[in-house]
Amino acid sequence: MEIRPIAHLECDFPTKFGLPRQSGLNSDLTGRIVFNPEFRNPDAVRGLKEFSHIWLIWAFSVPEREGWQATVRPPRLGGNVRVGVFATRSPFRPNPLGLTVAKLLEVVTEGANAPYLVIAGADMMNGTEIFDIKPYIPYADAHPEATGSFAEEMRGYRLRAEVPEEMLKVFREPQQRALLSALELDPRPAYQNDPNRAYGFLFAGYDVRFTVRDGVLRVFEIVKAENKR
């Protein structure tokens, strides 16, 4: 079977570092799904605006690998415990496909690149190729009684993020909320907890640098990405 991308995502995260680890965790993070010219047809999205959420099937950007491994080491288990690849959402899979549920904010049918979709809460980086879009159906897709194994252990985990107000002003207000949420979710790998180490990620054209100590994340520098040292 041959599949091909139908669209790609445009958002403020050009790399995976800083992205939420699961969809829906950062509801302030918005983006656009732009269809490839072949699929840029308003008839293809007719009726979609009646749904509040959508499923996205997309491709992980991972290095080429020979073969696959039956077990992986999830970051949330400290990177030291191996579990079956099908018991994780690791990108290192037989087929590097991701599955995301995103909130559908708007179906834009006029203007450049229309139709396109405006979404929130995705866990995908800028340029991610999308292979399919399906409506989220609450009565069939939602299972409140479901259990989440080791993924539940960090469900409510958040850091306190401190960002100087002057630094935040380089972003628009919606971007400020998305950035603060991304920082509170702790973008560091679970096995890295050095209070003297500086971390950083790219967001909306800027390099955001921070440290973490005693549960508090402090941003000490936000500079244009092209001036990154």
Image (tube, rainbow, N blue to C red):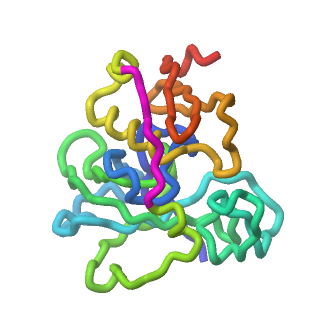
User: In the image, which residues are magenta?
Assistant: 156-164
Q: Residue at x 51, y 69 (%)?
A: 152
User: Residue 174 location, x and y as percent?
Assistant: 28, 36
The C terminus - image quarter: top right
Nearer the observer, 201 or 42: 201
Q: Residue at x 81, y 68 (%)?
A: 67
Asked whether 162 falls inside the magenta stretch, the response is yes
Q: Residue at x 64, y 64 (%)?
A: 90
**What secondary structure is the magenta-colored segment mainly?**
loop
Lateral position of residue 64 relative to residue 201, left or right: right
Lateral position of residue 39 relative to residue 41, left or right: right
User: Residue 116 location, x and y as percent?
Assistant: 29, 51
Nearer the observer, 160 or 177: 160
Q: In the figure, 216 relative to 9: above or below? A: above
Lateral position of residue 31 relative to residue 91, left or right: left
Q: In the figure, 227 relative to 67: above or below? A: above
User: Residue 26 location, x and y as percent?
Assistant: 38, 50
Q: In the figure, 197 relative to 67: above or below? A: above
Image quadrant where residue 192 sits: top right
Image quadrant where residue 138 sits: bottom left
User: Residue 211 location, x and y as percent?
Assistant: 58, 30
